[in-house]
């Protein structure tokens, strides 16, 4: 349920919007580990529409077993949150700020669920290590282009990690629909660093669930698509697809690489 209140909060990292940077994988924020994955989730306009709706209504997280509790949404008469933007070379153009324009609160999914907006705060309730972990986040930007849609959130105080993660759905010229996940993160406190091996296992599990989430058949999707299980999701292949996409973005036509040390 969307709440009408909105409280100004600060992210626990300074590089807000950096998941948009073209050179994130080569030059991540100092002290953070970057990852990027890409997987095909279907084909055709109906699948693209269904995947975009899912991405912009927290369905990727919910289908992955995470409970999303929306804590605050910028009211329609409030200023809109605008994340840092980058030029084609990856250089920041404008810092994150609150604009005087009103955010668009008029867009809804077919079932009446409002699409998420930049500035929204939420608490993700994650099952890990036999307990429920609450992870506060804020939506730092929303991508809304004809063939590319999605969003990113940044971590708030109380989240086990510090950093940012984005989920972008796009449709290529051949009609294929893809989900790209980009992130940079590190444990938020020394206490969480002590259990970093467990955190990495949990991250791997949920990354597989994220990549699999949009492969689930939707009423508007292609029912002929085969839905893989989480165990079938190949992170190495998804990382390689992302690396290929990054290479083509830099050198030519358009698909995700895991560049963590030792990978």
Image (cartoon, rainbow, N blue to C red):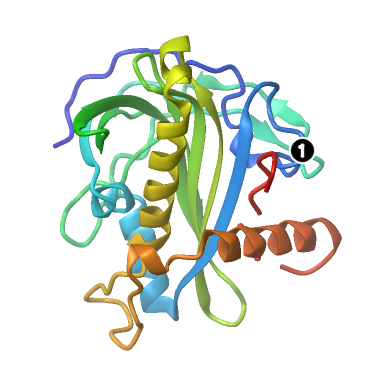
Callout 1: helix, strand or loop? Answer: loop
User: On the rendered structure, is 90 left or right of 81?
Assistant: right
Residue at image location 36% in from the left, 77% down from the top: 46
Near-viewer residue (72 or 25): 25
Is residue 18 visible from the viewing direction of this image? yes
Near-viewer residue (194 or 93): 194
Q: Position of residue 118 (x, y in %)?
A: 41, 33
Q: Tell me if residue 251 comes above or below residue 259 in the rendering.
A: below
Q: Residue furthest bottom?
A: 224
Q: Tell me if residue 190 comes above or below residue 258 in the rendering.
A: above
Q: Position of residue 86 (x, y in %)?
A: 70, 36
Residue at image location 82% in from the left, 56% down from the top: 250
Residue at image location 62% in from the left, 78% down from the top: 173
Residue at image location 82% in from the left, 41% down from the top: 89
Q: Quadrant of residue 90?
A: top right
Q: Tell me if residue 95 comes above or below residue 220 in the rendering.
A: above
Is residue 74 visible from the viewing direction of this image? no
Q: Position of residue 206 (x, y in %)?
A: 37, 47
Q: Tell me if residue 205 comes above or below residue 20 in the rendering.
A: below
Q: Which residue is mark 1?
A: 90
Near-viewer residue (199 or 109): 199
């Amino acid at each position: 349920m969307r709440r009408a209140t909105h409280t100004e909060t600060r992210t626990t990292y300074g590089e807000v919007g950096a998941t948009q940077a073209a050179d994130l994988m080569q030059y991540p924020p100092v002290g953070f580990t970057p990852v990027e994955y890409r997987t095909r989730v279907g084909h055709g306009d109906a699948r693209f529409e269904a995947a975009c709706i899912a991405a912009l209504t927290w369905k990727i997280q919910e289908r992955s077993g995470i409970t999303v509790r929306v804590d605050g949404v910028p009211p329609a008469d409030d200023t809109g949150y605008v994340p840092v933007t980058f030029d084609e070379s990856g250089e920041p153009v404008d810092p994150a700020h609150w604009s005087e324009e009103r955010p668009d609160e008029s867009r809804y999914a077919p079932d009446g669920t409002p699409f998420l907006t930049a500035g929204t705060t939420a608490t993700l309730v994650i099952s890990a290590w036999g307990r429920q972990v609450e992870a506060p986040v804020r939506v730092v930007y929303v991508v809304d282009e004809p063939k590319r849609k999605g969003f990113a959130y940044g971590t708030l105080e109380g989240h086990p990690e510090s950093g940012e993660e984005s989920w972008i759905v796009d449709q290529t010229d051949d009609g294929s629909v893809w989900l790209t996940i980009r992130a940079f993160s590190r444990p938020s406190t020394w206490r969480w660093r002590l259990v970093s091996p467990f955190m990495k296992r949990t991250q791997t599990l949920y990354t597989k669930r994220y990549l699999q989430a949009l492969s689930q058949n939707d009423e508007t999707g292609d029912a002929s698509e085969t839905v893989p299980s989480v165990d079938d999701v190949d992170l190495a292949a998804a990382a390689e697809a992302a690396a290929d996409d990054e290479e083509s973005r830099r050198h030519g036509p358009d698909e995700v690489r895991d560049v963590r040390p030792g990978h």
